[in-house]
Image (tube, rainbow, N blue to C red):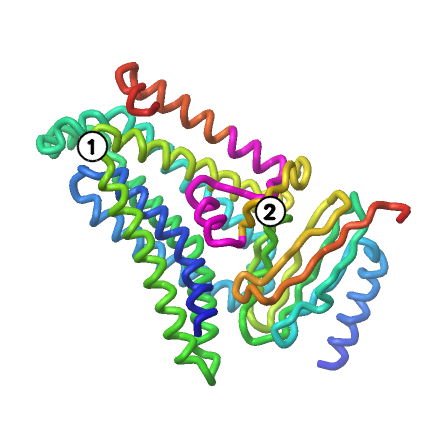
Amino acid sequence: MRLILTLLAAAALSSNAALAADEITLVVDHQKFSPSELSIPAGVKTKILIRNQDAMPVEFESYDLSREIVVPGHGETSIYVGPLEAGTYQFFNDFDHDMKGTITVKAKGN
Amino acid sequence: MLSTAVIMFREVLEASLIIAIVLGASRGIENRGRWVASGALLGLLGAAIVAILANLASSEFSGNPQALLNAAVLLGAVAMLTWHNVWMSAHGRQLSTEAKALGKDVESGQRPMTALMLITLAAVMREGSEAVLFLWAIATGGEQGSNMLIGGLSGVIAGILTGLFLYLGLLRIPTRHFFGVTSWLILLLAAGLAAQAAGFLNQAGLLPSLGNGIWNTSGILSQNSLFGQFLHVLIGYIARPSGIQVLFYAGTFASMLLLMRTYGGNQKKKAVC
């Protein structure tokens, strides 16, 4: 089991390295998004891996990005955003509106 | 408990308002209650299946399949609402003037019964799967479970009651204007659902966004507010729409209106305007 996990981690790391600029991980832990403030470059399609470590399902939703996806308890899923223009975009958990965060998109060169 | 009620209220609201509108719009059609009820039951069944799928095969089903299913369900609803409205613009006058004699008269025609059922099915299934997933997690969540479950169920009831009020309100519209008003409501509703579907198709990577935030009216009316959410369901209000959503909205609106005018015949124009 441990070996498999290590291999998976290694695979994840290497694919992360290849996609370094375009993939970020968003963890749900104890009813909080972590990090709650994400930063991505403008004009690039970005993959967000949402890992839910809580037992309750989470619905990642953003009116600003028109994104909406359910992540079951102890599950994970990925979602693409962008390419986006510079600015801030809010997201929240539709099952718990106190749980929210922002994605800040920065123009290149800044 | 209260927050659970609010969440469930939001989840149920969309389906409830849609059902209220189609129930209102199909006033005078025989047996419509039975069709709508069976649509709701099938929708619940579908929602339960989707929720189970999402729980079991979490990684396989999440991501794109989830977005694609949502888009398909929404587009199905749009197609059915179009059929319903086109049918209504052809027969609505008949329904309102000879509501009594209707039964036999229209029976021979192809009535939009299947459409009624499928619209209800789509509406219930779409938000229902999320509601089921959420309630299920609460119910199996141990401590505080029963308390939150009560909250959740009262949210469901409040959502259904809101739909009921809308339905009763619709029935108060004078017969002369009734089908005109409901066909406009359905037109806007369908355009809004098509815009939502466009969002999901973009999410799944099948369509370009054509620009994020063509405009941004979050400052004036947040989609998070209750009123913003009502408008979102009823007329498809989106505070910060992407280009593809605006395109789908306008396209659905225009083609549905064109179909209604074409098949509704000249004398029906009044009913639409």
Chain of the residue where label 2 is placed in the rendered structure: B
| Percent of width and height locating residue B176 | 22, 28
| Percent of width and height locating residue B33 | 21, 48
The N terminus of chain B: image quadrant: bottom left
Does label 2 lie on the same chain as label 1? Answer: yes
Toward the viewer: A68 or B115? A68
Please provide the residue range marked out in magenta: B224-250
| Percent of width and height locating residue B48 | 40, 63
- Crowd band around label 1 with a 10 angstrom C-alpha radius: few (<14), some (14–19), many (20+): some
Mark earlier in primary sequence (1, 2): 1
For residue B159, which quarter of the picture?
A: bottom left
User: Above or below — where is A75 with respect to B263?
Assistant: below
Toward the viewer: B74 or B174? B174
Is residue B228 rendered magenta in the image? yes
Chain of the residue where label 1 is placed in the rendered structure: B
Secondary element at image label 2: loop
Say which mark, if any, is on residue A50. none
User: Above or below — where is A27 with respect to B62?
Assistant: below
Say which mark, if any, is on residue B175. 1
For residue A102, which quarter of the picture?
A: bottom right
Q: Amino acid at mark 1?
A: Thr
- The alpha-carbon separation of the residues under discs 1 and 2 comes to 37 Å
| Residue name at image x 57 percent, y 45 percent | B220
Secondary element at image label 1: helix
Q: Which residue is mark 2?
A: B218
Q: Amino acid at mark 2?
A: Ser
| Residue name at image x 43 percent, y 63 percent | B8
| Percent of width and height locating residue B87 | 29, 29
Kindly give the residue lying farthest to the bottom in the view shown.
B143
- B174 relative to B47 in the view: left or right: left
Is residue B249 rendered magenta in the image? yes
User: Above or below — where is B212 with respect to B159?
Assistant: above
